[in-house]
Amino acid sequence: MNEEKFNPNAADADTMLILARLGERKRKLERMAEMEHRLARRTTARLYTSIVSAMAAVVLLTLVLVPLWRMQMSPLDKTGISQPTFSDYRSGNADIAEITKLMNRQDYKQALTVTKKALHTSDIALKDLYGKDVEFDDEELVYEEELERNTNSELRWAYIYLLVKLDDVKEARRQLHKYLKAKDYCQHQAEAKALLEEIN
């Protein structure tokens, strides 16, 4: 059976119209597919640009804000030093109870005033005790001196903390050197060294 080939010259007008419409429809579909392909490429490019821009913004913020935030941090925060606490057996001391209360209320200026006064009193008490002739068997006097040295050390550490809180770095440096000299009573030696390094 012989297949008849389409002869455009022999086709009637209606067939020709249908063929033209089909060709036009095919071209339109091809154009639409191409446009969809371009649109997909543009969307991908925009998405990629958005992701890159977002990442660049995060990196920029990290590079700018983190050092700025670190600069604004207190030396106490940088070294991880928290508010000092006093030994339980000193809680009966009126000055120490007052200092603790003021620090808890974040009244650092008043706490510094009370701490300075208490530390001065303790320094005088230590000089008096050190000046006395302590006999080998005078256990009460030895115990009293030991107790005062521990109190003095705790007060000095609180004093240093408050000085740094109130940005008196110069005095804090001086007190840190004094604090670190008394090695036997320096309970916060590692923190004191880190703080001194930070504020130097």
Image (tube, helix red, strand yellow):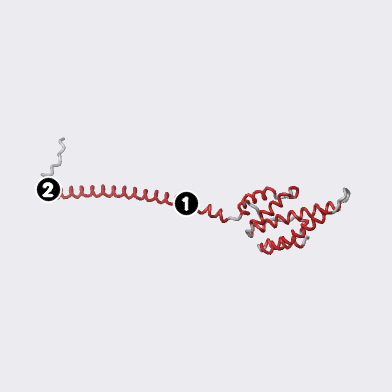
CA gap between label 2 and label 1 equals 71 Å
Residue 171, quarter of the rendered image: bottom right
On residue 178, the disc is none
Work out whether residue 13 or residue 192 is closer to the camera in this orientation and state it.
192
10 Å crowding of disc 1: few (<14), some (14-19), many (20+): few
- Left or right of 11? Residue 64 is right
Amino acid at the residue labelled 2:
Asp
Secondary structure, mark 2, is loop
Q: Residue at x 69, y 48 (%)?
A: 189
The answer to whether 18 appears left or right of 144 in the picture is: left
Q: Secondary structure at mark 1?
A: helix
- Amino acid type of the residue tagged 1 in the rendering: Leu
**Tag shown at residue 60:** 1
Looking at the image, the residue that sits furthest to the front is: 131
Where is residue 149 shown, x and y percent of the image?
78, 53
How many labels were placed on the picture? 2
Task: Residue 129: give x, y in percent of width and height.
Answer: 82, 55
Quadrant that contains the N terminus:
top left
Q: Position of residue 14 (x, y in %)?
A: 14, 50
Determine the residue positioned at 12% across, 48% down: 12
Give me the disc on residue 12.
2
Q: Sort mark 2 into few (<14), some (14-19) or many (20+) by Cα contacts within 10 Å.
A: few
Residue 30 in the image: state x and y as whole percent.
26, 47
User: For this rendering, which residue is in front, 169 or 52?
Assistant: 169
Residue drawn at (28%, 47%), measured in percent from left and top?
34
Horizontal arrangement in the rendering, residue 25 relative to residue 63 (left or right)? left
- The answer to whether residue 100 is above or below residue 42 is below
The answer to which of marks 2 and 1 sits earlier in the sequence is 2
Which residue does the image show at 24% across and 50% down from the upper left?
A: 28
